[in-house]
């Protein structure tokens, strides 16, 4: 967590005029050295001054061009949608809008870790499995909850201005990470914010440890194995991250932490991890759901399905990058004026 990175809850309108409740992470010019900038702010070899992440899982609104994602409170999150459909619904919002990337998701996990905050959420049909007194507002018999009605402990940083739903209620698609026949591949920096969700994207990078590809696979003996072995099993399975098995590795490599695959304290992590090394491409689904009483948690990672996968427990989250500091200051100014107006009333 860099001191020069600030954050503020803002409301920003997309090209259709739809309001979106976002958490804006921003860096004022002249307050940082380029080499210290988090990867989230690096897009196509340029540093952008602001990244905005939806505070809530998105619902979608029909438009002439198709579904458009929107981040609003008191809504039922959209589900039963493919990764590509989710990405398209975010891109229709306008320039800079995109489906949340794995780099952005990992940033939230790392910030929470550095703050010492355990992210709570709906992992037991409306409440938190580990802390049952924490409840959301349930809208159906499955135990799914409305956006914007969560306890503060369910935000990524424990504040009202944070990002909610990172743990529980719905899994969510992210871009910029995948398994390719068991090999971990990623998109560098935050380049996935620019059409990095495509399977034919030319910039997939193999995650390497000492020159060897990093791999994940389901073991026929049960559980998930992280490996740099030349040959691995073609199988799928899942386990708690704490039960992750290592093959030809003394410890989990730093690249696995950077990509948000596991936390530094992985040996005590009860969130689940799933991997399928049989698939040509397994896309990432993150954050656990409303029924994941065992293996739930913000760090839960599902690399077990193709990009055509749809489910009633998987939603989406839009994000936005701003290339102009003036656009960021306009949002900050508008927020300050709205706050002052509310105080005057």
Image (tube, grey):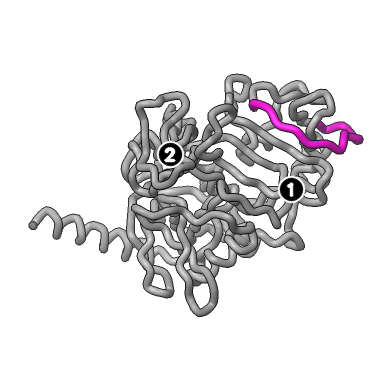
Q: Residues within 10 Å of mark 1 (few under 14, many from 20)?
A: many
Q: Is residue 177 left or right of residue 222?
A: left
Q: Is residue 19 above or below residue 78?
A: below
Asked whether the viewer can see residue 267, the reply is yes
Q: Secondary structure at mark 1?
A: loop
What's the CA distance linking mark 1 and mark 2? 26 Å
- The span picked out in magenta is 227-240
Q: Outermost residue, front direction?
A: 141
Give yes or no for residue 229 being in the magenta stretch: yes
Q: Which picture quadrant has residue 304?
A: top right
Residue marked by disc 1: 282
- Number of dots carrying numbers: 2
Label at residue 156: 2
Point out residue 167 in the picture as x, y percentages from the top left corner. Answer: 49, 38
Pick whichever of labels 1 and 2 is earlier in the sequence.
2
Q: Is residue 34 above or below residue 118?
A: below
Instruction: Check whether the beta carbons of the residues at disc 1 and disc 2 lie within 8 A of each other.
Output: no
Point out residue 229 in the picture as x, y percentages from the top left corner. Answer: 87, 32
Of 306 and 284, which appears nearest the observer?
Answer: 306
Give yes or no for residue 253 being in the magenta stretch: no
């Amino acid at each position: 967590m860099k001191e020069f990175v600030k954050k503020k809850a803002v409301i920003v309108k997309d090209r259709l005029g739809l309001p979106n409740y976002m958490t804006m992470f921003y860096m004022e010019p002249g307050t940082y050295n380029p080499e210290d900038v988090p990867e989230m702010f690096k897009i196509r070899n340029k540093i952008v001054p602001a990244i905005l992440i939806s505070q809530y899982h998105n619902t979608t609104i029909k438009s002439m061009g198709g579904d458009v994602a929107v981040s609003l409170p008191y809504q039922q999150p959209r589900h039963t949608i493919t990764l590509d459909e989710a990405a398209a619904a975010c891109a229709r919002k306008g320039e800079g809008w995109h489906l949340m990337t794995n780099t952005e998701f990992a940033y939230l996990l790392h910030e929470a870790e550095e703050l010492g905050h355990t992210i709570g959420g709906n992992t037991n049909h409306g409440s938190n499995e580990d802390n049952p007194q924490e409840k959301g507002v349930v809208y159906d018999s499955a135990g799914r909850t409305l956006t914007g009605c969560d306890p503060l402990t369910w935000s990524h940083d424990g504040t009202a201005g944070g990002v909610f739903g990172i743990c529980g209620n719905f899994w969510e698609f992210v871009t910029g990470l995948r398994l390719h026949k068991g090999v971990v591949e990623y998109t560098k920096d935050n380049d996935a914010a620019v059409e990095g969700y495509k399977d034919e994207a030319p910039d997939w990078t193999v995650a390497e440890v000492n020159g060897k590809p990093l791999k994940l696979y389901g073991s026929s003996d049960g559980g998930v194995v992280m490996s740099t072995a030349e040959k691995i099993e073609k199988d799928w399975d899942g386990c708690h991250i704490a039960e992750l098995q290592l093959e030809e590795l003394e410890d989990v490599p730093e690249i696995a932490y950077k990509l948000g695959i596991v936390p530094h304290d992985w040996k005590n992590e009860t969130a689940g991890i799933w991997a399928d090394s049989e698939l040509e491409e397994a896309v990432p689904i993150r954050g656990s759901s409303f029924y994941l009483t065992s293996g739930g948690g913000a760090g839960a990672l599902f690399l077990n399905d193709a990009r055509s996968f749809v489910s009633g427990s998987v939603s989406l989250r839009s994000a936005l990058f701003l290339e102009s500091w003036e656009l960021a200051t306009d949002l900050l100014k508008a927020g300050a004026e709205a706050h002052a107006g509310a105080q005057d009333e």
